[in-house]
Image (cartoon, rainbow, N blue to C red):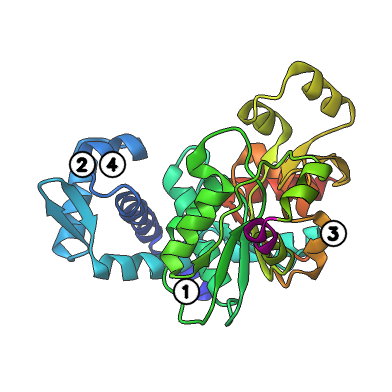
Amino acid sequence: MKHFIELQKKIAPEISNILEKRYSILLTIKYNQPIGRRGIANILGETERWVRSELDTLKKQDLIIVQPLGMYVTEEGEKILDELSIYMEELKGLGMLSKKLEYMLDVEKVIIVPGDSETRPEILKEMGRKAFECIKERITDNSIIAVTGGTSTMAVAENANKIDKKQITVVPATGGYSGKHETQANAVAEKLAGKMKADYYPLYLPQNINTAMLKAMMTDINISKVINLIDQTDIFIFGLSNFDQIAKKRKLDDDFYNCLKSKGAFAEAFGYYFNNDGEVVYKSGSVGIKLEQCDNISTVVCIAGGLKKAEAIISINRGKKNILVIDKKAAERIYDIMRGE
């Protein structure tokens, strides 16, 4: 395919441009359906006139269907999107970039999705789909999957589907934090389990519970069962944030914020705060996945995107045998940073 794309760029570069634009339209419809022409134009920053002409072509090819509520991608359109995503990766040279980042970061695998998830929400959803496609190949009978909260991991859950394996269990990887309930670890785990038709066990404990109270709570058979399941995790899915993002999200008070900042806090994931060198400077609470566990978990998947998270992705994943699912914007920034070292 790579050779074919290079020939196409030289002989008929306009074809690549057309395919890229129509891929963007199909992707926008898929993750926002039902949606109207004006909504598509606003998301893509194009004129309604241009969108209308492209939609006419997609409709004639039975890739979309128009209904009173808006447009939907057809089953054939879904198949075309899956195939086009591979084409787009090659067109953008993302396969080669993935290999370079795998070597530079010393990670197991890097999956790059074209686009910028900070400005295009459907790109994050596509990252979630790609992440789940990777994860489902590693799910076996009796797999225990732990997942953190956040919009990135929720994108994975929303794009999951039924798995033909026995006794799959999904648990939250951490206790609860202050913030939106719909993206807490419990909510993400419940959504993922529901989509996969798997078993789900909630953990109704705050992340910041003290050790003494945790010991007392472990006498409850339901809580101890979930904690034990977390300890047996063989697939772990997590998102991350840079320090300023997480400080704002969790509304850290000034004293705590300044304390962490003075320690060099740079990024956060599943309750751990890391400095720029990937060293832990603070651990929040005692409930959930422990950092030292990760080396013994067979599949660890980090999903994150956007320029703002590029340095945090490096800090937390460098030298770990993780699978990274990132967008093109983050990938290019990571490459520039690593090449400049």
Instruction: Tell me the crowding category of disc 2: few under 14, some 14 to 19, or many 20 or more residues within 10 angstroms, Cα based.
Output: some
Disc nearest the viewer among 2 and 3:
3
Hey, what amino acid is under mark 1?
Phe
Disc nearest the viewer among 4 and 1:
4
Residue 35 x/y as whole percent: 23, 44
Do the residues under discs 2 and 3 have CB atoms within 8 angstroms? no
Q: Secondary structure at mark 4?
A: helix
Q: Which disc, if any, is residue 330?
A: none
Disc nearest the viewer among 4 and 3:
3
Residue marked by disc 3: 292
Q: Is 157 left or right of 283, judged from the image as shown?
A: left
Hey, what amino acid is under mark 4?
Ile
Residue marked by disc 2: 37
Residue marked by disc 4: 40
Label located before the other in sequence (4 or 3):
4
Residue 200 x/y as whole percent: 52, 63
Q: Residue at x 75, y 69 (%)?
A: 297
Instruction: Tell me the crowding category of disc 1: few under 14, some 14 to 19, or many 20 or more residues within 10 angstroms, Cα based.
Output: few
Hey, what amino acid is under mark 2?
Arg
Residue 256 x/y as whole percent: 80, 23
Q: Is 200 left or right of 250, judged from the image as shown?
A: left
Marks 4 and 3 sit apart, C-alpha to C-alpha, by 45 Å
Q: Residue at x 20, y 42 (%)?
A: 36
Do the residues under discs 2 and 4 have CB atoms within 8 angstroms? yes
Label located before the other in sequence (1 or 2):
1
Nearer-the-camera pick, 67 or 64: 67
Magenta residue span: 220-225
Instruction: Tell me the crowding category of disc 3: few under 14, some 14 to 19, or many 20 or more residues within 10 angstroms, Cα based.
Output: few
Do the residues under discs 3 and 1 have CB atoms within 8 angstroms? no
Q: Which disc, if any, is residue 4?
A: 1
